[in-house]
């Protein structure tokens, strides 16, 4: 059993506070008041939503690819849009991804260069981590190149007509004819969220105000010339960080750009049990039945005893699961870990399933674990990528490794990503060679015994790639399947800031 909203249990603090007040002021709690307190306790437990987890299921999903390109140039620090243009963009992005579970979002940051802040994903935690941790003080570029963002947006999605939304103050150009041609030629559905006013705002720099080379104070205002590419893309110009308007735009522009499977957790709700007990306790507090049912106190103590007993059982399950894992009895280890409803135990259960060769089950568990810790999240993506490799779903593996690297760089994930690229390239070469051999045979070339073409996956994957999965095969996490749950905050690497501050982007390592 687990709790979906355990924070409600903090409300149980009113019980000791009540008894302290009774003793402090010399009051006396009679039987009816005690039954009322018991009723309150059960209501709080019901609000915490106790559930029994059931086996995850896979469901078909489809939606749009939404690429959001965020202007990170120096002018986005202006305060004519409170608290600043960039802060408003951050809030807008967070609201969008939290309120949309159907579409995939990708995030691009651009100044005179553009980089991928997040690949296309439906993971709201990943998006929040990356964009929320953006440190604008590390961005020193004062220019804006919208074209770099458009070119990178076109590369991010395989959709015929991807939806691109620019969060910008309009940039620097007097004319966007070249960008408008690119939008039309590449079939982009483009809209702009204008984060700037006609009056504009000064820009702070150090202890003073930003000035130009002639010593004049710089005032940054909106650039309406960017409307040229909005017209070319058949989109809309949205004034200010209007979340509802952007959501409406996404809904109206929705296409079936992608199809895939998503793992959905199923729960059996148990809230009605404490709710019924709360109702019974309330009746006892309001009637004379409470005085006659003194065994109710014993019932509550029994519940506490059951809870303590469950804690002892959890320890026994964890101990047995670890010993089974170390002995190589991975299926037995997974069965024991399944009795403990914690993210850490679920992670270790997935590790055991991976070692047992049940990659699909391990993948479903990894995908079901929720966490706000970016390091842990990166490890989940890394292990999911290894599961995809074992299942020979290389495109999904590539996406998982990219997300892992976006949250936290590791050599193992980098090596695996490179291996997939090499394997795909080799497979392409083999296909071309097979076609050439077939052509020569049809032309009357001598036939001989040919060597079988070497394919990716299977034992080749295991020997050539950085071993991982289950949290215990790779170099980073070796024999112990358990994982450190230390908290941290995802931050962009120094390399990313270097890329966005220069005039070119290294496309082979977008993270």
Image (spheres, rainbow, N blue to C red):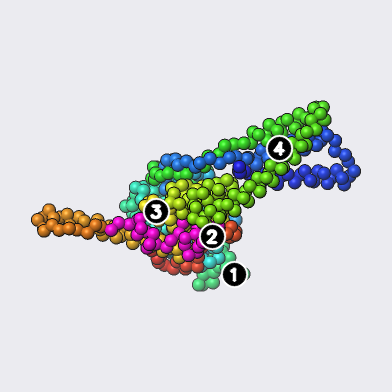
Q: Nearer the viewer, mark 1 or mark 2?
A: 2
Mark 4 near mark 2, Cβ–Cβ under 8 Å?
Answer: no
Q: Magenta region, mostly helix, strand or loop?
A: loop
Which of disc 2 and disc 1 is earlier in sequence?
Answer: 1
Q: Nearer the viewer, mark 4 or mark 2?
A: 2
The answer to which quarter of the image holds residue 429 is: bottom left
Q: Position of residue 53 (x, y in %)?
A: 56, 41
Residue 506 visible? The answer is yes
Q: Which mark is residue 206?
A: 1
- Look at the image and say whether residue 466 sits in the magenta stretch: yes
Q: Which mark is residue 390?
A: 3
Disc 2 designates what residue? 480
Q: Classify the position of the C terminus by image quarter.
A: bottom left
Which of disc 4 and disc 1 is earlier in sequence?
Answer: 4
Which range of residues does the magenta coloring cover? 454-482
Q: Residues within 10 Å of mark 3 (few under 14, many from 20)?
A: many
Q: Residues within 10 Å of mark 1 (few under 14, many from 20)?
A: few
Name the residue located 53 percent from the left edge and 62 percent from the top edge. Answer: 491
Give me the C-alpha separation between circle 4 and circle 2. Answer: 39 Å
Disc 4 designates what residue? 42
Give me the C-alpha separation between circle 2 and circle 3. Answer: 21 Å
Secondary structure under badge 2? loop
Which of disc 2 and disc 4 is earlier in sequence?
Answer: 4
Name the residue located 58 percent from the left edge and 40 percent from the top edge. Answer: 52
Name the residue located 39 percent from the left edge and 51 percent from the top edge. Answer: 391
Q: Nearer the viewer, residue 272 or 110?
A: 272
Give me the C-alpha separation between circle 1 and circle 3. Answer: 53 Å
Which of disc 3 and disc 1 is earlier in sequence?
Answer: 1
Secondary structure under badge 4? helix
Mark 1 near mark 4, Cβ–Cβ under 8 Å?
Answer: no
Q: Position of residue 85 (x, y in %)?
A: 54, 56
């Amino acid at each position: 059993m687990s709790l979906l909203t355990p924070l409600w249990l903090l409300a149980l603090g009113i019980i000791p506070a009540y008894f302290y007040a009774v003793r402090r002021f010399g009051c006396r709690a009679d039987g009816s008041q005690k039954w009322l307190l018991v009723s309150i306790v059960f209501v709080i437990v019901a609000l915490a939503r106790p559930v029994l987890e059931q086996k995850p299921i896979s469901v078909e999903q489809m939606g749009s690819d939404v690429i959001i390109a965020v202007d990170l140039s120096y002018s986005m620090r202006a305060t004519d849009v409170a608290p600043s243009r960039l802060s408003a963009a951050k809030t807008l992005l967070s609201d969008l991804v939290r309120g949309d579970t159907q579409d995939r979002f990708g995030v691009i940051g651009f100044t005179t260069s553009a980089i991928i802040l997040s690949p296309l994903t439906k993971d709201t935690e990943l998006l929040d981590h990356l964009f929320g941790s953006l440190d604008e003080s590390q961005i020193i570029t004062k220019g804006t190149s919208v074209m770099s963002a458009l070119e990178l947006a076109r590369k991010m999605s395989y959709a015929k007509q991807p939806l691109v939304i620019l969060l910008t103050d309009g940039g620097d150009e007097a004319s966007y004819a070249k960008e408008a041609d690119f939008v039309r030629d590449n079939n982009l559905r483009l809209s702009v969220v204008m984060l700037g006013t006609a009056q504009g705002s000064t820009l702070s720099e150090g202890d003073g105000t930003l000035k130009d080379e002639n010593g004049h104070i710089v005032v940054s205002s909106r650039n309406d010339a960017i409307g040229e590419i909005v017209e070319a893309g058949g989109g809309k110009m949205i004034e200010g960080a209007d979340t509802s308007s952007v959501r409406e735009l996404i809904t109206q522009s929705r296409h079936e750009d992608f199809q895939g499977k998503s793992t959905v957790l199923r729960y059996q709700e148990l809230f009605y049990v404490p709710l019924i007990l709360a109702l019974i306790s309330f009746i006892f507090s309001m009637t004379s039945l409470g005085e006659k049912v003194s065994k109710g106190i014993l019932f509550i103590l029994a519940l506490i005893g059951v809870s303590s007993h469950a804690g002892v059982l959890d320890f026994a399950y964890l101990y047995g699961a670890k010993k089974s894992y170390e002995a190589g009895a991975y299926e037995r280890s997974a069965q024991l870990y399944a009795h403990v409803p914690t993210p850490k135990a679920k992670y270790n259960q997935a590790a055991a399933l991976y070692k047992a060769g049940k990659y699909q089950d391990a993948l479903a568990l990894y995908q079901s674990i929720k966490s706000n810790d970016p390091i842990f999240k990166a490890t989940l993506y890394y292990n999911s990528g290894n599961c995809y490799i074992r299942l020979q779903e290389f495109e999904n593996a590539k996406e998982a490794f990219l997300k892992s690297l976006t949250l936290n760089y590791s050599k193992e994930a980098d090596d695996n990503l490179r291996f997939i690229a090499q394997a795909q390239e080799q497979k392409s070469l083999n296909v071309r060679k097979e076609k050439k051999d077939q052509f020569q045979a049809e032309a009357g070339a001598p036939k001989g015994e040919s060597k079988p073409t070497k394919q990716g996956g299977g034992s080749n994957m295991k020997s050539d790639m950085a071993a991982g999965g289950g949290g215990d095969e790779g170099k980073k996490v070796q024999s112990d399947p358990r994982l450190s749950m230390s908290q941290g905050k995802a931050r962009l690497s120094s390399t990313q800031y270097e890329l966005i501050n220069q005039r070119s982007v290294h496309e082979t390592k977008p993270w």
